[in-house]
Image: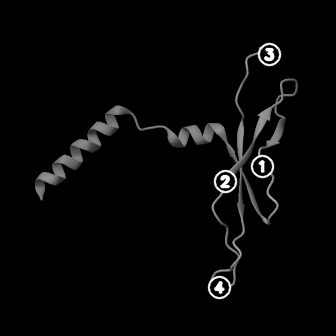
């Protein structure tokens, strides 16, 4: 493997349970915040090292998200699709 430094493969978030249950008596989660990441090991492909930037002390739920999946969600649609949607919105505004 090369010595170039790669980024994390996964992001780790945590959402604490809210103190007050909802009207049905169920515990609800608060907002999730990023607390760490998983980095791929150089010598063992498929394994990772979990590094916490913050360790929660309250009860809650951990979430692990793949970095590639996050990037795909954030990508914009191709320019051709964006142009056609603008044209459609312009056409519908003229009809009004």
Disc nearest the viewer among 2 and 4: 2
Q: From mark 4 to mark 1, how far is it between C-alphas?
A: 32 Å
Q: From mark 3 to mark 2, how far is it between C-alphas?
A: 33 Å
Disc nearest the viewer among 1 and 3: 1
Q: Are marks 2 and 1 in contact (CB under 8 Å)?
A: yes
Number of residues whose C-alpha sits closer than 10 Å to that of mark 4, classed few (under 14), some (14–19) or many (20 or more): few
Tag shown at residue 33? 2
Q: From mark 2 to mark 4, how far is it between C-alphas?
A: 26 Å
Where is residue 7, by image quadrant? top right
Q: Is residue 20 above or below residue 7?
A: below
List the residue tagged with mark 3. Answer: 1
Quadrant of the frame with the N terminus: top right
Report the residue at 73% width, 17% height from top. Answer: 4
Q: Are marks 3 and 4 in contact (CB under 8 Å)?
A: no
Which residue is nearer to you in this view: 79 or 50?
50
* Between discs 3 and 2, the one toward the N terminus: 3
Numbered disc 3: secondary structure? loop
- Judge left or right: residue 87 versus residue 4: left
Q: From mark 2 to mark 1, how far is it between C-alphas?
A: 10 Å
List the residue tagged with mark 4. Answer: 24
């Amino acid at each position: 493997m090369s010595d170039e430094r790669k980024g994390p493969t996964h992001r780790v978030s945590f959402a604490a349970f809210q103190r007050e249950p909802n009207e049905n008596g169920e515990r609800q989660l608060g907002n999730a915040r990023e607390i760490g990441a998983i980095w791929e090991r150089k010598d063992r492909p498929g394994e990772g090292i979990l590094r916490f930037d913050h360790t929660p002390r309250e009860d809650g739920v951990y979430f692990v998200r793949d970095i590639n999946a996050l990037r795909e969600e954030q990508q914009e649609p191709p320019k051709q699709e964006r142009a056609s949607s603008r044209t459609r919105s312009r056409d519908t505004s003229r009809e009004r």
